[in-house]
Image (spheres, grey):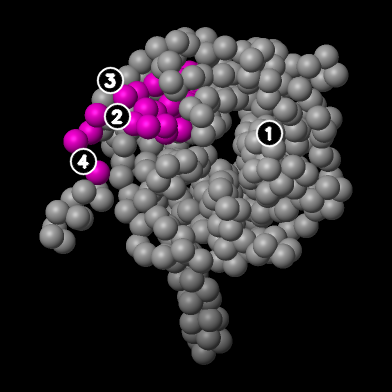
Amino acid sequence: MGGLGNLICWGILPVIVAIGGFYMQYQANVFKLLDIGKHVYNHYPGPCRVVEGLEYGAEKVIVLPNGLAVIGSGIKLAGRNMTWVENSGLFLFDFTNPWQNVTKFQFSSNYDPTGFNPHGIAFYENQRTGRISLFLVNHRPDGDAIEVFDIDFANIRLIFKKAFRHPLIYNINDIAPTGENSFFATIDQYSTSERGKYWEIFGFLKWGRVIHVDGSEAKVVWEGLNYPNGLAITRDRRHLYVAEFVGGDIQVFDVSQKDKSLKHVRSIATHTHPDNIEIDHDSGDLWIGSHPVFFRIFQLKKGPIAPASQVIKISYDPIANRAPIINEVFSDDGMILMGSAGAAHWKSRLLVGSVFERLVYCEINVPYTANDIVDRWTI
């Protein structure tokens, strides 16, 4: 029996040690994800103000080449008892006249705004005609749809054109148009139940995907992403950026011009939780609204652990593929802006939008960027 007991003991002991080691590693990963002990310092790029007229979130902010910005407001997040969805809408902000506030878009008569629940927004400009189409992720009560509008700037009106639906169009977070009838989109999580989504995050399951839709056809073009969130495509439609919200990386892809398949080029570690990506029209820099402390995202009121806000700028050339330069442009502990989700830059002017509450406008008066420092040291 002694020999059998020793055999059993020595057989079980490695299993216990292995389980204990796995549990300790899992706990360490959870603490790292939650950003336990991380502190946020406040700094701003210049004078800032709260833009009036948006009290129910500004989850996605995009800017057109002419300096007009479109903001989506009023997203209703699953699992939270939020009543502001009735106030949801799309709003216009003019960077060329930044001391004015936002104006709400009206919809054409052929569009039913009932249950309007906006998320990702992007635009497509027809290079031949100059016509701008607005693509929108709408989490309708009967399922996700990608809706397309023409923009009537003179009357601040959106003219409904079409809607895309497909079994692969679900849990859509953001979109990047590739044509008037085609686009990339992120499926941030595979699961459709709240419990399944929870375990995807805290089980560190990389089940997120990128799809491409062309007319009535849709296909998965990339898998294995850790909560893919924001999405942006370069103006020549040759390079795609995907923000992994839980993973903390920006994934860079080359886009095949033949079939829209993707080739991975680089992972850019941000050491934060990137949300939406906006590409600067002049420089090609990435402006990213981010969440620096993960566990604070789940708070919904001002206080010591209010959701913090952060904007980072990434200077990167996907053709040269040299090491990117990352600057933190805006940082706030949640007292001015809770939970920054998006940022849009236009000629030294910045809009920062929140999932939860409002929109902040800032002038950028910083004396230099990391690029200037690098240039000075290399002279």
Residue type at numbered disc 3: Pro
Q: Closer to the observer: label 1 or label 2? A: 1
Q: Is the residue under label 4 in contact with that under label 1 (CB below 8 Å)? A: no
Left or right of 151, for residue 246? left
What is the C-alpha distance between the residues marked 1 and 4? 36 Å
User: Which sits in the foreground, 176 or 129?
Assistant: 129
* Residue 121 occupies quadrant: top right
Q: Position of residue 278 (x, y in %)?
A: 50, 40
What is the C-alpha distance between the residues marked 1 and 2? 31 Å
Q: Position of residue 223 (x, y in %)?
A: 66, 60
Q: Closer to the observer: label 1 or label 3? A: 1
Q: Position of residue 350 (x, y in %)?
A: 39, 28
What is the C-alpha distance between the residues marked 4 and 2? 10 Å
Residue type at numbered disc 4: Tyr
Per the rendering, the mark at residue 364 is 2
- Which residue is painted at 44% across and 22% down in the image? 95
Upstream in the sequence, badge 4 or badge 3? 3
Upstream in the sequence, badge 1 or badge 3? 3
Q: Secondary structure at mark 4?
A: loop
Q: Is the residue under label 2 in contact with that under label 1 (CB below 8 Å)? A: no
State the residue position of label 4: 368
